[in-house]
Image: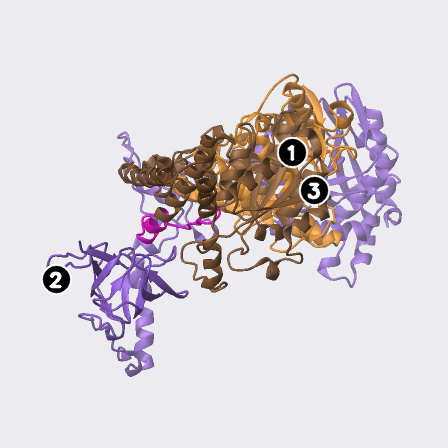
């Protein structure tokens, strides 16, 4: 019978081979296992043995043909048999295209070469280019694809029927985010039907519309703490009026010739004064927990500073051991960090006694709420010129009022009052603070 | 409830499982006489004997290979790699053999082995001894990878790993063996393949695992002072990854930060972020931020090393960034 | 040895030969994919080893594993089905030529990474040692594998802990295309065992009886508690390293010399000379082997492909995820 020899797979990644040489010619006798042809793969030239014995009836491909694996390459018939060209249908495995390797012409080759586009731009004057550029913004303003909005915002807008092009974005890069949509009104809110009242237009004053604002996280957190403090701590207050002559004079002298960045503030004086006074009043530099009182080893003065939507306390650690200029510098650095949103953990942790200064707002005096778990807080008013009595006669002097709020579980009126007196020593003899 | 360290948690799990099942044994370098280079197996040799606490030669491929062979043949080995940095010496046996034998032989082979390996940097051990290559091992199907961040999870997960019929890579952190935490009394296990919300919050989803869990807790405490409420989701297992609590949290907060000790590129965070984008795109209100090690080999110098490693501050800043 | 035992060994060797020749043809037709490493010329080695072992002894080998598969008793049609990637293959079509195994027969595969199975052999023996079982682990590997780090670690650990392993090196003179003279500092492989203080032996791998006897002795020696031992089996593969090997590293004349002294021809002569069988008897065995392989191919062709679902099966015992 007539047997077809196929191009063998000679390697795991072989897809086709080149039949470089017929070793057995047509009509030659061949035994099973004899070399029939030489095949060239990517890797080597290999001898292919005939799987059949008999006579080579026909070479189906010429030398130097590229043949895919599995395609027929020759027919071997038994000795004495005659070969009928038509009787043997070459087994097709996959594509049966057989091409002479050196005659390969891709059929119907599409002309894929692209003519280089003539550069129209070069013909256009620069004026025209500018016009084109200017046109763009107005064209794109109509399309919503250009609007920067988070996927969440887009979804909410779609659900509520809100047009994003009318919403200002507050996220980075003016991206519209969820909170921006919370302020937006959905278009299908019906206008309230006003009850018909005979109004006298000229006298009637229309009241403003209510503004509903979401309380910020920070404000909410502060509120929670203040409520707790106010409700649970049995506090009392003591106000002391300090003679501000000495330290305001010293301050002026120290700041003469200093740049703004290096100027010492009134508050800096109070930080140092409080810290030094606390050295002798450890009860006021303490915390209470159940029946235990902890008198802190360090004197860390916390200073309340205003931030957007709330309040932060920045802390000058070991303020009793630092000089006035050091305290001032540190305060400025921390305040800058707060402004830039780069406040560190260290800046806001560990306060043992807090001061709050509203002196820049013409405040005579005020009472601050204790910052738990601290024992006390000092509220400082404005330094003002007020009438004073000296040796029975009326004159004018600089005074500043400070009010201490203190926890009555930890201290009492006498101790607190003595503390306030002790502070006077430092404030009114300010050279001690340097 | 008792308060114990990570070291004690791991040690207790090993001890209890060895008592429970005589097929469990420990093999590794210096685990016996020395008591373990991180003292995890201190005292074990005297109690269990040299057959079950096997000091091995310095031959990681043989250690893991021996674990594989003995697991195939009926034992339940716990192999210790002195550090995960030495896993590369046995890489073939971990990812080619351990991860694939059960599959290639169509379920005939059973590999109930555990490989314990501590990783992490911050002790000036220099680049080749300080890596967190967890993501590489989590990449291979066929291997389970767990990395607990609390003593409770450390104890419970190790027990589950030892009892599992599948091979488990149990990643410890070499710098937090003294980290303390509450652990239930008595017998308990933690399931492999389950993430956990370690701290509830409503503003940002902070996804993390291993040492970064305690860093995240510290960051959350600081952020709380500024009125920011962070929800911490601890992955606990890297493969198979449980995204359900992550997605649930993200749908609530719409903003996510991922904190890991390894490098950012091609890391665990890349996978988590991709999955969040895939599964919760419409809930995204800001791009996801990843906190990770800087793209450098870790240097010896103490300050530089800390500069390279992710810190609590970095997590705090990332959370604030994502809330802008 | 009994006459029936002899004839059984001859049958196995001829069956392996027919299987390998048929596999080569199927590979060239594109029906077998990937790599195919033929055992032609080495049949006496695996046959002698498995004949010598007791049923509780373990055997683990590298990727040229079809011989061992037949010897341990995996049906040839199941081996064929695995080669064709069918669901009825011994590894469900998921392992292929290099990953045949049968755990019930203590045949632990079939491994593709050179030398990686050697530390695993140490582990198998470790478990037997710890559980005080009377089993030896036979680890087969090529001479090329004695150069990789895994060999050193595995052999060293086995000797240090006195584990029951027989390290069997099939030295077929070429690791892929590099002879030991070009790859090893010490090309007389048996010498390498000295570095580990292990007793070492060698045997002619073209003589199945010699292999069987030697392995029997070694196993009893190890079983008696004398620690691991090393056996170099000198053999030769008549075909390339794998399909597609152009064999530029050796001459046709050299190959022909070994073919003329091949294991099956040797044994055949022996069986006739010792009147263990006659020509007709041997021809009958050969015919039955040929028929068995033809039937095996038919079985494999008619077997189903694995289902798509099989892709995700057996990743874990406790399956928890989909890809």
Q: Secondary structure at mark 3?
A: strand
Q: Is residue C32 part of the magenta span, yes or no?
A: yes
Q: Residue at x 16, y 59 (%)?
A: A80
Mark closer to the observer (2, 1):
2
Report the disc number at residue A85. Answer: 2
Vertical placement of residue A231 versus C117, above or below? above
The answer to if C12 sits in the magenta stretch is no
Same subunit: marks 3 and 2: no
User: Which chain is the one coloured purple?
Assistant: A
Q: Is A110 left, or right, of A136 in this rendering?
A: left
**Image x and y of residue C157, in percent:** 68, 40
Identify the element where label 1 is drawn.
loop
**Between marks 2 and 1, how big is the CA–CA gap?**
66 Å
Q: In the rendered view, does A254 fall on the left or right side of C253?
A: right
Q: Quadrant of residue C280?
A: top left
Q: Colour of chain B?
A: orange
Q: Is residue B164 left or right of residue B312?
A: left
Residue with the mark numbered 3:
C199
Q: Please give the residue where the numbered disc 1 appears in the rendered image.
A: C164
Chain letter of disc 1 in the image: C
Q: Residues within 10 Å of mark 3 (few under 14, many from 20)?
A: some
Is B308 in front, or is B316?
B308
Q: Quadrant of the N terminus of chain B?
A: top right
What's the magenta region? C23-42
Give the main secondary structure, helix, strand or loop, of the magenta stretch: loop
Secondary element at tag 2: loop
Cβ–Cβ under 8 Å for marks 3 and 1:
no
Q: Disc 3 to disc 2, how far (Cα)?
A: 67 Å
Depth-wise, is mark 3 or mark 1 nearer the camera? 3
Task: Of the two numbered discs 3 and 1 on the same chain, state the one appearing first in sequence.
Answer: 1
């Amino acid at each position: 019978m007539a047997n077809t020899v196929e191009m063998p797979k000679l390697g795991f990644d072989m897809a086709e081979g080149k039949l470089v040489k017929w070793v057995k010619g047509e009509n030659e006798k061949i035994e099973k296992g004899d070399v029939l042809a030489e095949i060239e793969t990517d890797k080597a030239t290999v001898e292919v043995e005939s799987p059949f014995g008999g006579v080579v009836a026909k070479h189906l491909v010429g030398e130097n043909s590229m043949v895919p694996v599995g395609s027929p390459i020759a027919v071997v018939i038994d000795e004495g048999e005659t070969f009928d060209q038509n009787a043997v249908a070459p087994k097709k495995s996959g594509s049966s295209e057989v091409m002479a390797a050196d005659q390969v012409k891709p059929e119907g080759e599409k002309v894929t070469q692209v003519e280089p586009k003539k550069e129209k731009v070069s013909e256009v004057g620069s004026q025209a280019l500018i016009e084109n550029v200017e046109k763009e913004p107005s064209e794109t303003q109509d399309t919503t694809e250009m609007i920067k909005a988070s996927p969440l915002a887009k979804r909410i807008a779609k659900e509520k029927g809100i047009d994003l092009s009318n919403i200002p974005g507050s996220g980075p890069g003016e991206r519209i985010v969820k909170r921006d949509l919370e302020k937006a009104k959905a278009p299908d809110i019906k206008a309230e039907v006003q009850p018909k009242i005979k109004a006298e237009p000229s006298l009637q004053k229309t009241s403003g519309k209510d503004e509903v604002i979401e309380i910020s996280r920070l404000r909410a957190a502060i509120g929670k703490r203040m409520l707790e403090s106010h409700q649970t701590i049995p506090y009392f207050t003591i106000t002391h009026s300090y003679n501000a002559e000495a330290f305001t004079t010293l301050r002026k002298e120290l700041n003469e010739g200093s740049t703004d960045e290096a100027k010492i503030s009134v508050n800096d004086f109070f930080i140092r004064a409080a810290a030094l006074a606390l050295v002798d009043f450890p009860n006021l530099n303490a915390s209470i927990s159940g029946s235990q009182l902890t008198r802190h080893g360090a004197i860390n003065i916390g200073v309340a500073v205003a931030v957007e939507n709330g309040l932060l306390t920045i802390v000058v650690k070991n303020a009793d051991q630092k000089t006035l200029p050091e305290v001032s510098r540190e305060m400025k650095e921390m305040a800058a960090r707060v402004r830039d949103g780069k406040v560190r953990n260290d800046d806001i942790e560990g306060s043992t006694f807090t001061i709050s200064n509203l002196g820049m707002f013409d405040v005579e005096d005020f009472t601050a709420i204790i910052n738990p778990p601290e024992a006390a807080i000092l509220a400082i008013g404005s330094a003002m010129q007020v009438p004073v009595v000296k040796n029975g006669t009326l004159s004018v002097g600089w005074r500043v009022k400070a009010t201490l709020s203190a926890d009555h579980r930890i201290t009492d009126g006498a101790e607190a009052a003595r503390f306030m007196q002790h502070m006077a020593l430092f404030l009114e003899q300010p050279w001690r603070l340097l | 409830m008792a308060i114990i360290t990570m070291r004690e948690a791991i040690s207790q799990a090993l001890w209890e499982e060895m008592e429970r099942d005589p097929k469990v044994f420990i093999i590794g370098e210096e685990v016996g006489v020395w008591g373990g280079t991180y003292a995890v197996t201190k005292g074990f040799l005297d109690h269990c004997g040299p057959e079950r606490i096997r000091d091995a030669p310095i031959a990681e491929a043989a250690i893991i290979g021996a674990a594989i062979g003995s697991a195939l043949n009926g034992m339940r080995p716990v192999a210790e790699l002195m550090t995960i940095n030495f896993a590369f010496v046995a890489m073939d046996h971990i990812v080619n053999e351990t991860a694939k034998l059960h599959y290639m032989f169509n379920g005939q082979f059973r590999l109930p082995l555990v490989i314990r390996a501590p990783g992490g940097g911050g002790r000036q051990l220099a680049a080749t001894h300080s890596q967190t290559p967890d993501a590489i091992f989590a990449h291979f199907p066929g291997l389970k990878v767990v990395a607990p961040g609390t003593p409770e999870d450390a104890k419970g997960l190790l027990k589950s790993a030892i009892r599992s019929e599948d091979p488990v890579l149990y990643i410890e952190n070499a710098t937090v063996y003294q980290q303390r935490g509450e652990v239930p009394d008595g017998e308990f296990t933690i399931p492999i393949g389950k993430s956990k919300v370690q701290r509830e919050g409503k503003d940002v989803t902070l996804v993390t695992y291993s040492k970064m869990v305690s860093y995240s807790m510290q960051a959350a405490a600081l952020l709380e002072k500024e009125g920011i409420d962070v929800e911490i989701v601890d992955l606990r297992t890297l493969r198979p990854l449980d995204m359900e609590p992550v997605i649930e949290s993200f749908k609530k907060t719409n903003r996510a930060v991922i904190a890991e000790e390894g490098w950012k590129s091609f890391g665990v965070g890349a996978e988590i972020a991709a999955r969040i984008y895939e599964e919760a795109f419409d809930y995204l209100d800001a791009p996801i931020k990843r906190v990770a090690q800087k793209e450098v080999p870790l240097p010896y110098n103490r300050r530089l090393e800390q500069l390279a490693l992710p810190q609590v501050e970095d997590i705090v800043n990332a959370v604030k960034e994502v809330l802008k | 040895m009994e006459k029936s035992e002899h004839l059984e060994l001859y049958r196995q060797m001829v069956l392996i030969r027919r299987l390998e020749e048929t596999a080569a043809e199927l590979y060239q037709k594109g029906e077998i994919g990937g790599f195919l490493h033929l055992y032609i010329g080495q049949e006496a080695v695996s046959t002698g080893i498995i004949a010598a072992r007791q049923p509780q002894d373990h055997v683990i080998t590298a990727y040229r594993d079809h011989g061992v598969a037949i010897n341990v008793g995996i049906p040839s049609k199941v081996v064929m089905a695995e080669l064709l990637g069918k669901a009825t293959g011994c590894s469900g079509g998921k392992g292929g030529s290099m990953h045949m195994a049968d755990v019930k027969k203590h045949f632990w595969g079939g491994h593709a990474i050179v030398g990686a199975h050697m530390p695993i052999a140490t582990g198998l023996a470790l478990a037997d040692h710890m559980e005080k079982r009377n089993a030896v682990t036979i680890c087969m590997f090529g001479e090329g594998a004695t150069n990789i780090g895994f060999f050193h670690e595995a052999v060293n650990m086995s000797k240090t802990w006195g584990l029951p392993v027989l390290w069997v090196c099939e030295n077929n003179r070429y690791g892929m295309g590099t002879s030991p003279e070009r790859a090893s500092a010490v090309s007389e492989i048996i010498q390498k065992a000295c570095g580990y203080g292990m007793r070492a032996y060698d045997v002619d791998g073209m003589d199945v009886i010699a292999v069987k006897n030697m392995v029997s002795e070694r196993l009893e020696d190890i079983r008696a508690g004398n620690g691991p031992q090393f056996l170099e089996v000198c053999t030769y593969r008549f075909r390339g390293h794998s399909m597609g090997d152009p064999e530029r590293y050796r001459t046709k004349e050299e190959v022909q010399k070994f073919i003329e002294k091949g294991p099956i021809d040797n044994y055949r002569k022996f069986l006739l000379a010792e009147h263990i069988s006659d020509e007709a008897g041997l021809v009958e065995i050969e015919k039955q082997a040929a028929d068995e392989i033809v039937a095996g191919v038919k079985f494999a062709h008619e077997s189903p492909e694995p289902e798509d679902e099989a892709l995700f099966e057996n990743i874990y015992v406790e399956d928890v995820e989909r890809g």
